[in-house]
Amino acid sequence: MRTDRTFTMLKPDSVEKGHVGAILEKITASGFRIVAMKLTQMTTDDAKTFYEVHSERPFYGELVEYMTRGPIVAAILEKDNAVEDFRTLVGATNPAEAAEGTIRKIYAASIGENAVHGSDSDENAAIEGAFHFSGREMF
Ligand code: IDP
Ligand code: MG
């Protein structure tokens, strides 16, 4: 299992608010190389599958609605220690608890609409990257 790649989505609120360029700049300035990237929209089935681990949580329906309401930017990022370093850059799930300078502190509106996704393990990074990209879309 490689440890130098993670998967991210700039969620619909980031695209709607025009924050894509600024967030990508912050990501690349933090040392991540973009290995794969596209603008895409998840179907309800896609979002239900992607977030299946949360299917019993009270916010699951709201989460699926949010993640499918418009396009996202999906990307695979490369850097040493990618998963952990990207979670640090992203900040806490709830922007009110996120550290200064983190993406969620700057761009997220709430715990639900929190601007970006970052994989939580090397295993999930590989699964989530493969969910969105074929081998020939990864560089
Ligand atoms: P993470 O994105 O920081 O890993 P998770 O706990 O895996 O956070 O939750 C996945 C996503 O579900 C969050 O990024 C957020 O969009 C949404 N979410 C998490 N907790 C809540 C909540 O309490 N209310 C509404 N939405 C939530
Ligand atoms: Mg998570």
Image (cartoon, rainbow, N blue to C red):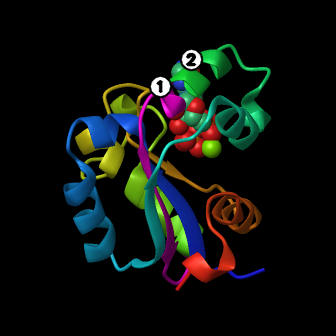
Left of 124 or right of it: where is 28?
A: left
What's drawn in magenta, residue-wise? Answer: 66-81
Return the residue nearer the eye: 10 or 105: 10
Query: Residue 112, image x and y in percent?
Result: 47, 25
Query: Residue 106, image x and y in percent?
Result: 23, 43
| Residue 95 belongs to the span the image colors magenta | no
The amino acid at mark 1 is Gly
Q: Quadrant of residue 23?
A: bottom left
Return the residue nearer the eye: 32 or 21: 21
Mark 1 closeness class: few <14, some 14–19, many ≥20 residues within 10 Å: some
Check whether the beta carbons of the residues at disc 1 and disc 2 lie within 8 A of each other.
Answer: yes
- What residue is pinned by disc 2? 62
Query: Residue 72, image x and y in percent?
Result: 43, 46
- What residue is pinned by disc 1? 112
SS under mark 2? helix
Mark 2 closeness class: few <14, some 14–19, many ≥20 residues within 10 Å: few
**Looking at mark 1, is its residue's CB closer than 8 Å to ligand 1?**
yes
Residue 36 higher or lower than 89, as above or below: below
Quarter holding the N terminus? bottom right
Q: Is residue 4 visible?
A: no
Return the residue nearer the eye: 60 or 82: 60
Q: Earlier in the sequence, mark 1 or mark 2?
A: 2
